[in-house]
Image (cartoon, rainbow, N blue to C red):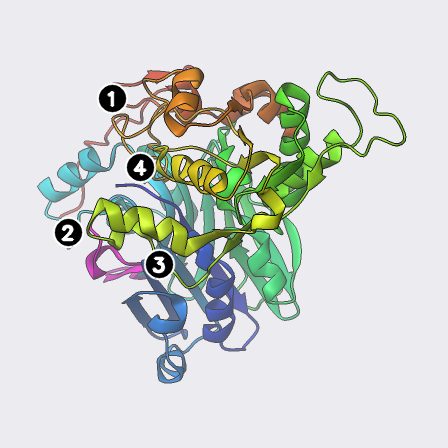
Amino acid sequence: MTEKCGVVGISLDGRAAARPLYYALYALQHRGQESAGIVTHDGFQQHSHVEMGLVGDAFGLDDLETLNGSAGIGHVRYPTAGSVDTSCAQPFSVSFKSGSLGLSHNGNLVNADEIRDELAGKGHAFTSDGDTEVIAHDLARNLLEEDLIRAVKRTMQRIHGSYALTITHDDTVLGVRDPQGNRPLCIGKLEDGYVLASESAAIDTLDGELVRDVRPGELVVLHDDGQGFDSYQLIETESTAHCFFEHVYFARPDSVIDGSLVYEVRRELGRKLWEESGVETDVVMPVPDSGRAFASGYAEAAGETTADGEPRDEDDEGVEFAEGLMKNRYVGRTFIMPTQDERERAVRLKLNPIRSTVEGKTVTLIDDSIVRGTTSTQLVQLLKDSGAEEVHMRIGAPPIVAPCYMGIDMATREELIAADKSVEEIRDEIAADSLAYLSTDAVADALESDRADLCLGCVTGEYPYDIDGEETDREVSRPEIDQSPVHADD
């Protein structure tokens, strides 16, 4: 099981790190609602508090007061590789002969089972089936033989897949990004220290300043006096594999990821959606909240040119942008409903149409993706029941045709509607009057990136990593499992 997570690490000049970590996790709550945790170190010992649930539920005032120290890391989790219980909640912490470790992981390894089996054969005892514990055990083992920098490099050379890590080694805070930069990680400067976070929005929450992204293959070590950081480029690669879906859906619109403001990227994707497949309708509306920036860019482009690409006359304002669906933010996930009828009813609980916006009008409905097709079918029917004459669906990403192995829950091929259906077959199934997706070339253009530097596996079926049973879109090699002898005290 894979999905997105959020990580943070902070080192301050004497000030307690627990509250800033707590606030940063709140800013990253959208990246995971399953569990939340913080590990700190006070220079003498490590402190940990990890609970299931939202950040606000996982921590009370008393919990934060027990997390002593000016250095620490935090984590919010959706299920990644491993169980949905406290055994896989993070940060993962361990004490060993060379000190104590805390580790937060966003991403997914594709060779975790191999490494776990090899380490278990050497006497390592595992308490979970998650890949984060595999990284922690491997790093702890290497720290018995190497200094910190070499130990991290050795672990990076063995693990294969996507990872953005924040780590405490005693009271030293580290940040590591996988060699292809699949998952985001950035550095921020605070008044009295530095912060590492999955997204810059967390840095903004702490009144910090974004310094830059952690580079693919880079290790960043924050100074324990809060006065700076050291950088070590441990692994170099010819190309990256940035996850394009961070910009399409996962990241907050106000975050800057790999140099691009997510909100502006989504607006540009919307503009390109109009250029590629615009349709003249009375109104364009987003599926809240994910489709809002796309719809804004789409409507703006529609105000400049016709669907045929011709400049509009001065008195032709193009397609009207309007909110036609209102979201109820107090409804939980649809999968907790025990019957199909209740799951369908949940859509009406979550989204209610504004009848005056749609009645008697042709409508373009814009969303970021269609995964299983169930919600899209219900939304099209909802708008038609509310009097829409036509409903045209436009999607700000290419069709999702394959699962993600890099840390995003894309469902299985059997569940993905686009895996075995054409666009026309999907249009027919969701009962839209027309349906169009964005092209992969348009995504690369909007991100100002070469396609070779993006991970597009979920929309192409070709991956930037060597994954058993799947095709790869580039020359890659798995790390060899290190079978060299280890010391007896390992």
Determine which residue is flagged by label 1: 468
Residue 109: which disc?
4
Three-letter residue code for mark 1: Asp
Residue found at x 55% / y 70% = 12
Earlier-in-chain disc, 4 versus 2: 4
Q: Is mark 1 on a helix, strand or loop?
A: loop
- Whether 249 is among the magenta residues is no
Along the viewing direction, whichever of 3 and 343 lies nearer the viewer: 343
Report the Cα–Cα distance between label 4 and label 3. Answer: 30 Å
Determine which residue is flagged by label 3: 332
Q: Is mark 3 on a helix, strand or loop?
A: loop
| Foreground label between 1 and 2 | 1
Report the Cα–Cα distance between label 4 and label 2. Answer: 16 Å
Q: What element carries label 2?
A: loop
| Foreground label between 4 and 2 | 4
Three-letter residue code for mark 2: Phe
